[in-house]
Image (cartoon, rainbow, N blue to C red):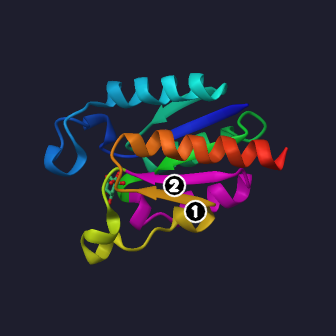
Amino acid sequence: MKLLVINGPNLNLLGVREPEIYGREDYAALCRLVEESAKALGAEVALFQSNHEGAIVDRIQQALGEADGIVINPAAYTHTSIAILDALKAVALPAVEVHLSDLSAREPFRQISYPGMACLHTVTGKGLAGYREAMEWLVHYLRQRG
Ligand code: DQA
């Protein structure tokens, strides 16, 4: 089973960026957690981070025929990107949305998620551990589906 974990803009600055909201662990720590979680779940994982909307769309398209499912934190594109929503719908791979912070407790402009409309499940407000939970959910779903 092959998973693809995608992170959007500014997540490469984890640890530096608003640590009171996003925590003190850096992007390398997030990558380690994702790789360890994949190993524990008996899955393969590819990681991708970009600050560019089109690059994220390209990577989602590339996942077709390559990955069994996608975990995505579209970051700020969550609230703006119909292109990422359409890419997820186009490849029609099972996808889970993850956010470090609790979006329901934040600004009104963060209350809408376009990519989330193409996701089967959302994990929000659990920090880095949310990625493990999202991967567990996705692997469980893929194994149940067969
Ligand atoms: C985020 C929440 C978004 O609103 C924000 O723009 C981010 C990170 C999160 O993980 O909590 O960049 O997706």
For ligand 1, give the image quadrant.
Answer: bottom left
Q: Disc number at residue 97?
A: 2
Q: Is residue 90 above or below residue 112?
A: above
Q: Position of residue 12 (x, y in %)?
A: 31, 35
Q: Residue at x 62, y 29 (%)?
A: 41
Amino acid type of disc 2? Glu
Q: Is residue 102 above or below residue 57?
A: below
Q: Position of residue 143 (x, y in %)?
A: 77, 41
In the picture provided, is 14 more to the left or to the right than 87? left
Residue 133 in view here: yes
Membership of 81 in magenta stretch: yes
**For mark 2, does the 10 Å Cα neighbourhood hold few (<14), some (14 to 19), or many (20 or more) residues?**
many
Task: Specify the farthest residue to the right.
Answer: 146
Between 50 and 144, the one lying in front of the other is: 144
Residue 7 in view here: no
Q: Position of residue 1 (x, y in %)?
A: 73, 31
**For mark 1, does the 10 Å Cα neighbourhood hold few (<14), some (14 to 19), or many (20 or more) residues?**
many
Q: Residue at x 33, y 46 (%)?
A: 127
Q: What range is drawn magenta here?
A: 77-99
Residue highlighted by disc 1: 85
Q: Is residue 54 above or below residue 46?
A: below
Element carrying mark 2: strand
Element carrying mark 1: helix
Where residue 42 sits, quadrant-wise, is top right
In the picture provided, is 58 more to the left or to the right than 18? right
Membership of 130 in magenta stretch: no
**Disc 1 versus disc 2: nearer the observer:** 2
Q: Residue at x 58, y 25 (%)?
A: 40
Amino acid type of disc 1? Leu
Ranked by sequence position, the earlier of labels 1 and 2 is: 1
